[in-house]
């Protein structure tokens, strides 16, 4: 939205309803359909969960999230039920206008009065945002020992652990069996029943979600050890430029999966692996902590790093090609760096390599992995080519005419090169042929 052109409410009316966006933080469209089969049968032909809720469901006695069933709410509050029968209010209107503030019983083991000392809950009430206050309840509810979840519903394995919530005296939080507790949070504080460490299948290590993510040490989505973060855009979008990852200490890795590479905002993340990425502009020149950018298991049908999908690296950043196949060329720009390193591995076999850089004078190509590596012609403006590694390397094209020195003394794999002419000083003796 551009300032002055529309409001959030206008945007919701124009677009949000059609996009099935929730009108309330606490409204869950997917659960609404699952819990109300008659609604699920009615959606379609211009009707979706949000539109049904706005037109009908908000005035009816329905369940619209795993934590709020309006029938249970009325059952636990006879005075409210009487007011609804008299047409004075609806169940939802009473809950959102009065029930949250009054600390009412939701009828499912959640009594809102236990949140009256919680800072986040109280702050939301203070500014009159009862929707946000109820969202705080949602975050705690699965861990309340009194909570009675709907039949068939279980919390997600990666449900955040509310270590910041202090329940009233005499109540201990309990981690549901299917919820995974990150090792960094153990042992849990004494607000939890000890010995209940959850379980279930751990989610992918520090995996980005479809929400806007902000991973850091403070919120326990990173540690000062060697962390591995994952973003997968193959079937749904989990990585966007608005996501943030601060890896903390250690040597941290970000793994991206998808055809068009997208990077979140990265701080203190040293290694980037782009799995299957055949396109998407990638610029790591401004990421001072990144030391390695790797393309992994890529099958090329078009040039890599071509116009519109440029690859730009910075000083002291290495480019890796791990099992990259296809006859297409690679183009990468090392900016103002004076030296560059290209690591080819695990049977990489591709076309010409064009490396740009106004100050680039020395290029190191390291060949390693489980199978021989093959490149086409090499084009870069520098005079020095260093060759290292234990796997064989074949360059089928002619080397750049600017090269004056080839040093293969640190290479133990076999080497095959083509030179076009000129006076080239060649140093070998690394053990290969």
Image (spheres, helix red, strand yellow):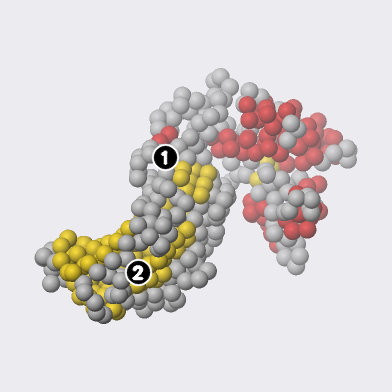
Question: In x, y percent, where is residue 36?
Answer: 69, 53
Residue that label 1 marks: 248
Q: Is residue 367 left or right of residue 155?
A: left
Residue 96 appears in the picture as rendered: yes
As drawn, is 214 to the left or to the right of 407? right
Q: Say if mark 2 contacts mark 1, CB within 8 Å.
A: no
Name above or below for residue 432 compared with residue 55.
below
User: How packed is label 2: few (under 14 Cα within 10 Å), some, or many (20 or more)?
Assistant: many
Q: Residue at x 27, y 70 (%)?
A: 403
Residue 13, percent from left and from top: 79, 55
Between residue 330 and residue 181, name the one nearer to us: 330
Residue 12 can be seen, yes or no: no
Residues under labels 2 and 1: Cα distance?
Answer: 36 Å
Circle 2 is placed at which residue position? 380
The circle on residue 260 is none
Q: Quadrant of residue 41?
A: bottom right
- The structure residue drawn at horizontal position 65% and vertical position 45%, both measured from the top left corner, is 65
Image vertical order of residue 322 relative to residue 9, above or below: below
* The one of 301 and 38 positioned closer to us in this rendering: 301
The location of residue 214, given as percent across then percent down, is: 53, 44
């Amino acid at each position: 939205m551009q300032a002055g052109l529309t409001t959030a409410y206008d945007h919701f009316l124009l677009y949000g309803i059609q996009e099935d966006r929730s009108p309330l933080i606490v409204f869950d469209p997917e659960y609404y359909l699952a819990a109300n089969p008659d609604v699920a049968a009615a959606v379609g032909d211009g009707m979706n969960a949000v539109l049904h809720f706005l037109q009908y469901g908000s005035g009816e006695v329905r369940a619209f999230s795993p934590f709020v069933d309006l029938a249970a709410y009325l059952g636990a509050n006879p005075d409210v039920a009487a007011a609804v029968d008299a047409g004075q209010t609806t169940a939802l209107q009473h809950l959102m206008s009065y029930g949250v503030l009054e600390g009412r019983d939701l009828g499912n083991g959640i009594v809102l009065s236990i949140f009256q000392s919680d800072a986040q809950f109280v702050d939301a009430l203070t500014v009159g945002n009862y929707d946000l206050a109820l969202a705080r309840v949602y975050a705690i509810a699965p861990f309340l020992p009194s909570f009675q979840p709907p039949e068939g519903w279980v919390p997600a394995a990666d449900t955040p652990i509310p270590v910041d919530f202090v329940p009233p005296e005499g109540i201990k939080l309990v981690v549901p069996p299917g919820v995974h507790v990150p090792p960094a949070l153990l042992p849990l504080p004494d607000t939890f029943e000890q010995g209940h460490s959850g379980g279930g299948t751990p989610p992918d290590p520090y995996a980005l979600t479809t929400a806007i993510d902000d991973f850091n040490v403070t919120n326990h989505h990173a540690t000062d050890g060697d962390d591995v973060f994952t973003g997968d855009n193959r079937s749904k979008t989990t990585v966007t430029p608005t996501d943030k990852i601060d890896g903390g200490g250690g040597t941290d890795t970000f793994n991206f999966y998808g055809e068009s590479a997208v990077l979140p905002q990265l701080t203190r993340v040293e290694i980037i692996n782009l799995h299957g990425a055949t396109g998407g502009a990638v610029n790591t020149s401004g990421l001072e902590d990144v030391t390695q950018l790797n393309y992994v298991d890529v099958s090329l049908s078009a040039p890599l790093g071509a116009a519109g999908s440029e690859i730009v690296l910075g000083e002291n950043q290495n480019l890796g090609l791990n099992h990259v196949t296809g006859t297409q060329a690679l183009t990468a720009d090392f900016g103002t760096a004076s030296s560059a390193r290209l690591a080819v591995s695990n049977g990489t076999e591709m076309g010409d390599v064009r490396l740009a850089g106004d100050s680039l004078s020395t290029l190191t190509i390291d060949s390693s992995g489980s199978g021989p590596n093959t490149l086409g012609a090499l084009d870069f403006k520098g005079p020095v080519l260093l060759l290292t590694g234990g796997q064989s390397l074949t360059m089928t094209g002619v080397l750049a005419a600017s090269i004056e020195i080839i040093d293969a003394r640190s290479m133990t794999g076999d080497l095959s090169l083509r030179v076009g002419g000129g006076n080239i000083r060649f140093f070998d003796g690394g053990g290969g042929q």
